[in-house]
Image (spheres, grey):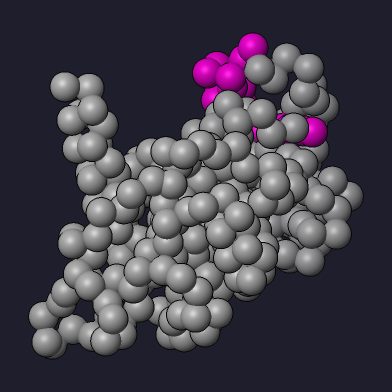
Amino acid sequence: MKHISSLKNIELKKIQLLLNKGKERKKNCLFVIEGEREVQKALQANYIIQKIYIEEGSIECLKKIKSEVQLIPIISVKREVFKKITRRSGSEKILALAKSKTHNLDDLKLSDNSLLLVIESPEKPGNIGAIFRTAVASKMDAIIVANSKTDFYNPNSIRSSLGSIFLIQTAIASSKEIISFLNKKSFNIGTAVISKDSINYDCYDFNTPCAIILGAENSGLDNCWLESNNQKLIIPMAEEIDSLNLSVSAGILMYEARRKNSIVENKSIV
């Protein structure tokens, strides 16, 4: 097994650039995964792992993925050096260099029963990761990111998703492209927006195929969503509160959509 003992090593410099610079990730179509659980989920989702770096003496962290990494180069890194190149503090002892995937609308595999979440212009990686984690938990079929302002493979997004970001179909496109795509596929659209035409979210049936649309906390949704044929939804709140965190709003709507459709599925079985 190859061993690296210097922070000046060219491979480790590349790792640091990819961890810290979105432009480097985009230019090289590569990104870094930190953590045993996250690497395991990336492998589960058939991401191509080019190399794995482990803290010296930590070969046990590969036990759960032993069969999947047999053909992947594994490099041991001096303990003091490894701790300096990682962004996460604590017990994580593994990094993986992975190849990015493309995220095109036309690659999504959907059906007449699909539930989608569209998030427009999300900015906070932590929020994005939390939304992906909840989307996987609530069994959404895909997430579409509109007018993305944050690199999809930001390490903070991966970390806050606990690797769930790898486990759900994802597309990235402009809002207008997404509206055209949803209309072409005959999706029902529910947009989270305050309007005189808005109804409480729990009054909406979320009939599939259905897409739930949320905008950024500070700017809301682009006007093109307000002009399109959709149902506007609100989440009732106490007067003292004027907004919810984006990931919280997304979670409420995703679970309500899943609940409504589970009721329909159970009735159809009976």
Residue 126 included in the magenta stretch of the image? no
Looking at the image, which residue is at 69% across and 34% down? 47
**Above or below 70: residue 24:** below
- Residue 88 is at least partly visible in this image: no
- Asked if residue 15 lies left or right of residue 166, the reply is right
Q: Residue at x 69, y 42 (%)?
A: 107
- Report the front residue among 167 and 28: 167
Residue 26 locus on image (x, y percent)? 79, 59
* Place of residue 224 in the rendered image (x, y in percent of width and height, measured from the top left): 55, 79
Name the residue rendered at 23%, 64% in the picture. 201
Q: Is residue 203 above or below residue 10?
A: below
Q: Is residue 137 visible?
A: yes
Magenta span of residues: 49-67
Looking at the rendered structure, the number of numbered marks drawn on it comes to 0
Q: In the figure, residue 246 lies in which quadrant?
A: bottom left
Quarter the C terminus occupies? top left
User: Image point 79% across, 66% down: which residue?
Assistant: 23
Q: Would you place residue 101 above or below residue 146 in this image?
A: above
The residue lying toward the viewer, choosing from 51 and 182, is: 182
